Amino acid sequence: MYAEHGGNIFDEDIRLDLSANINFLGMPQKAKEAVINSADKWEKYPDPYCRKLRKRLAEKHRVSKEKIVCSNGADELIFKAVHCFFPKKAVIAAPCFSEYEKALSECKCEISRFILSEKNEFFLVGAILEALDDADMLILANPNNPTGKLIEKDLLKRICEKCLEKNIIFLCDECFIEFCERSDSRSALCFLNENVIVLRAFTKIYAMPGLRLGYAVFGDEKKAERIASFGQFWSVSAPAQAAGEAALDEKAFIERTVMQTKTEREFLEKELKALGIKVFSSDANFILLKSEVKLDEILKKEKLLIRSCGNFSGLNNNFFRIAVRSRGENLQLLEALRRNLKWQRL
């Protein structure tokens, strides 16, 4: 009935969720306070155009507010973009976030999967450019989910240029990029043109998935206006808008997140390798693993939840994704793995 995603703690007795890639620092305090203080606005309809929030986002990304569209989570914009432009053939890189394919399938679009190679550590390579010749939409994530790999900067530039040359809509999902070092220089925003749409979300970086807030930056105002006209009129709630405006003031929070995420990711990668688990290096706040042992099953017995990646195109049931969490939570994961993997080897 529903696609499988991380964060499904409702049907299980789980004490630690490592399946959803949410900032382990939690929601910034100012954002929480803004939600509470917005309560007197809940009896009125929210601003359907998110005027204050779009103005702040436009200042952050140094574009006109007419090039910003806010949404009920980033997922909404994926579906809006696909339904709005209604591509006949789209290219995606596999493995990737399953909602791309779901949105494209709803429009009866032909889907071409560019398979990322395990031998190449799942990096996107230049051959993607050749795969675009007869497409009218390209959807990529930067960094990719579940591999955690950023797109190499020069390749990203060439992709943006080719999409403009061939009139291909390029939806670049950057919902995890703010966890990465030097993210400003690795973003498709550096190469924005009239065919590029950069997708962002408050969900992951500001730990507010329950509020549902995403946005897109467009290179073309007309495309932004066209997508904004799709779907429900009051897309973003008043508390979500308030939280978003407050979160944008938290520059030190982002810097602390990047630093602590890197420290914990490197710690986890080292310790997991020492346990004999295949680890694919990541730029994001999650790590892709490979193991013949059913890690999800043994950890569930310990009331720990990780993401099985068997339903990702290009992967199988030997692949797993874990979120990078705090040191204490990461140690709980490692201790549970040590206990169970030791038993598996006996």
Image (tube, grey):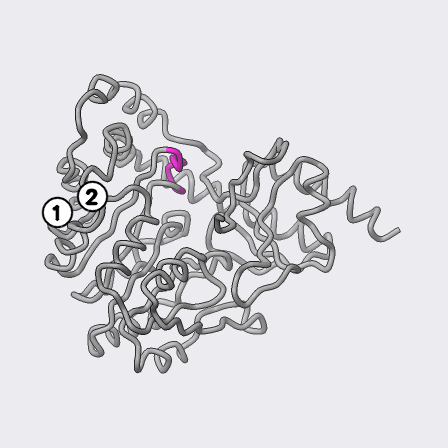
Q: Nearer the viewer, residue 86 or 120?
A: 86
Q: Are marks 1 and 2 in contact (CB under 8 Å)?
A: yes
The residue carrying pointer 1 sits among few (fewer than 14), some (14 to 19) or many (20 or more) residues within 10 Å by Cα, namely many
Q: Position of residue 280 (x, y in %)?
A: 58, 60
**What residue is shown with label 2?**
57
What secondary structure is marked by label 1? helix
Q: Nearer the viewer, residue 86 or 157?
A: 86
The amino acid beneath tag 2 is: Leu
- The numbered dot on residue 65 is 1
Q: Which residues are magenta?
A: 204-210
Q: Nearer the viewer, residue 248 or 141?
A: 141
- The numbered dot on residue 123 is none
Relative vertical location of residue 10 with respect to residue 315 in this rendering, above or below:
above
The residue located at (16%, 55%) in the rendering is 224
Relative vertical location of residue 286 with respect to residue 72 in this rendering, above or below:
below
**Residue 162 figure quarter:** bottom left
